[in-house]
Image (cartoon, rainbow, N blue to C red):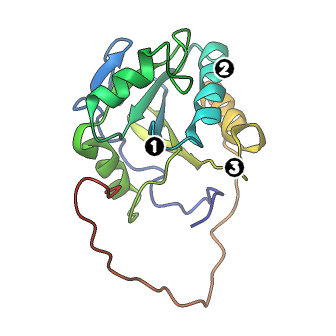
Amino acid sequence: MSIITYDDDKALGKPAPSIASAKFLKGDPTDVTDGKVHVLLFMAQYDKGNYPVIAAFSNLADKYTEAVFTGLSIDPKEEVVVKFLTSKEDPTAIPPDFTFGVAWDQGKEVASTYKEAGQEQAITIPTAYITKAGSIVWKERFGQAAPVSKSQFEEQLKRVLAGEELIKNGPAPKTDAPVIEEEVNVEGDFSLF
């Protein structure tokens, strides 16, 4: 799986699935169907690698107030997300001054619809989408080797908000390597999707 978003990414240009089924725990409920520019960040408390991304997205939300930012937590239990948002004793909790809304994606319903839109086997976290006028216009994955500060995300968001053409990365490189798939049986609510 590549961190780079290529021009032929299957999610780009697809209708943005609604996020109305997610339960908002911080901020006012919103939906990508309202015609505004939305930034959706799929995240989870259990993945500590999300924390620098969440902090970076808070800064972006402060800077680009004309976009609607929403964090979509795929944590298995609502109380985990509530504690993540509010606990003063937990050093991993999101500080209360974070400016974007957070919703709990119960049962990963919203994440599953975005996975299907991009014809992917799973949505890795953290992954962010930019939607405009009800369509997915950009998607980017982040990780330790691909922090937000070294990504194209902010530049692409600026361009979407300005109505400018996005940076092009060309088609995904073709590979002759065989795709190896194996089935893994996981009990309980451990699977991502």
Q: Is residue 19 left or right of residue 12?
A: left
- The answer to which of marks 2 and 1 sits earlier in the sequence is 2
Residue 35 visible in the displayed image: no
Task: Please name the residue that numbered disc 1 is placed on.
Answer: 136
Tell me the CA gap for discs 3 and 1. 25 Å
Q: Nearer the viewer, residue 52 or 42?
A: 52
* Residue drawn at (44%, 16%) of the image: 87
* Residue density around tag 3, few if under 14, some if 14–19, many if 20 or more, within 10 Å: few
Residue type, mark 3 in image:
Gln
Q: Residue furthest right?
A: 150
Tag 3 near tag 1, CB within 8 Å: no
Q: Nearer the viewer, residue 41 or 139?
A: 41
Mark 2, mark 1: which one is toward the viewer? 2
Task: Please name the residue that numbered disc 2 is placed on.
Answer: 59
Residue 62 visible in the displayed image: yes
Please determine whether, in this image, residue 53 is positioned above or below residue 107: above
